[in-house]
Amino acid sequence: MTIELKLPELGENITSGKVIAVLVNVGETIAVDQSVIEVETDKALIEVPSSVGGKITEIHLKPGDDAEVGGTILVIEESDASMEPTLDEENFEEISSDTAESMDPAETQPMMIDEPAPSLETKGKDAATTESATAGYSLEPTETPSEASAPENTETPAPKSKKEPAPAAPSVRRIAREAGVDISDVPGSGIGGRISAKDVREFVAAQGGAAVPGAPAPALMSVPVQLPDLARWGEVRREPMSGIRRATSVNLTRAWTSIPHVTQCEKADISELDDLRRKFSQKAEAAGGKLTITAILIKVIASALKVFPQFNASVDAGVNEIVYKNYVHVGVAVDTENGLLVPVIRDADKKNIIELSVELGEAAERARSRKLAPDEMQGGSITITNLGGFGGTYFTPIVNWPEVAILGVSRARMEPVWAKDAAKFEPRLMLPLMVSYDHRIIDGADGVKFLRWVADALEEPMLMSLEG
């Protein structure tokens, strides 16, 4: 039996990836869950496993190709062993009848096209089950007897039923969500009524552009500005954006155009803190971590969010609500050779600084080796971006949407500071801090208080225990 192995869902809103390596050859016999290709997405390098075992007869992709989700990777002649019925298959009817009442109704329903397919963590038989569950759904319109006898209407397409999934790619659905549009209301111009990004934009324009609540800024929905012919003035060189650079461009444009930014600056005297950091650095190293200012800041920020809950929130502009988060997950920007990645440290408020230093080191290493899973870079409460290792004094970080604040850190420097008690200037190690925040829900006074609290906690670590 010949089977086409398809590229499975790579993550939420990811429709394609670039093939970095093909790990198998034609004629090779592979096992279930064996990796067959490496695919680069916007944020991660993912190994795609095979859901079946057998002999490879065709390979449809090569390094450098763009692989679409649902497209054929290779063709496998399934081995006899993999075709033998499993225990679950032999007893499928018995299992179904015995457990039907106890199972979650949502789990017993076939997966709709409108719902996200399982990620790469769903392997083997689960992936095959997913394909069989969706096989009965066609993007082509079905015809009922009454429709067959009805006269054909070539002028106005019949409206789609809200109960049926609208035929559209995940990327198109995201555009519709961001514009505050129900994808089922958009008439599709493609084959079988398939909806394109152009259809969504035209629908938004027909509705008056900004008439729908929660629509992003017009710049996000408009056609990119056409560059002039730069080659007229000299030699130029063009390079395609990497996946990470494309994602960065989209995310930062969305954040900058949808969030009214304010940046507040402060300095913290970390002279005593740096002495303590050096004193206890060996304890962190013994645990497998590195006691850095960033690791300490994760703990400080986690405590600050308890004192200033408006910084641990998101704005739902579509319904004019503020969503306050009862968890504390801190994202940390990591510079890699491929671009900026932001792994998220979960439950930072429940971990000590040694634990945070170990977890931060591991996350940074996975980021640099492109081993971060997409969900490891989502769900943050606030982000820290520390450029102190590169230098600089002050900068204005852009909020990592849908968060409402980001803490920037520059290089600490020795500065003369007036010591009131000694009536003289003393050399102190001063750390520049910047916080950019969403001015829709955070007032300027709160921004100053928040950043001053962070500075005080660095200068007086006991403050975290007293108030955080």
Image: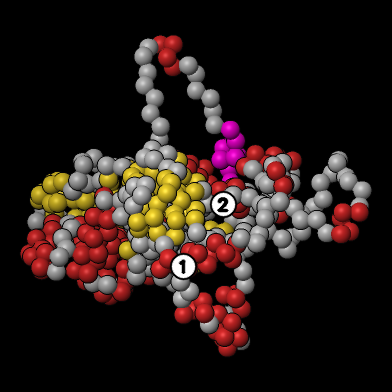
Q: Is residue 319 above or below residue 464?
A: above
Q: Are marks 2 and 1 in contact (CB under 8 Å)?
A: no
Which residue is found at the position 61% from the left and 60% from the top?
Answer: 135
Apparent side of residue 232 relative to residue 215 in the rendered image (left or right): left
The image shows residue 39 at horizontal and vertical percentages of: 38, 48
Which class describes the residues within 10 Å of circle 1: few (<14), some (14-19), or many (20+)? few
Observer-nearest of 320 and 64: 64
Q: Nearer the viewer, residue 348 or 111?
A: 111
Q: Is residue 330 above or below residue 41?
A: below
Numbered mark located on residue 237 in the image: none
Front position in the image: 304 or 115: 115
Indicate yes or no whether the magenta region holds residue 140. Answer: no
Question: Which callout, 2 or 1, points at the residue further toward the start of the chain?
Answer: 1
Q: Secondary structure at mark 1?
A: helix
From the image, state whether disc 2 or disc 1 is nearer to you: 1
Mark 1 belongs to which amino acid? Answer: Met
Amino acid carrying label 2: it is Pro
- Residue on which disc 2 sits: 170
Point out residue 329 in the picture as x, y percentages from the top left corner.
Answer: 37, 65
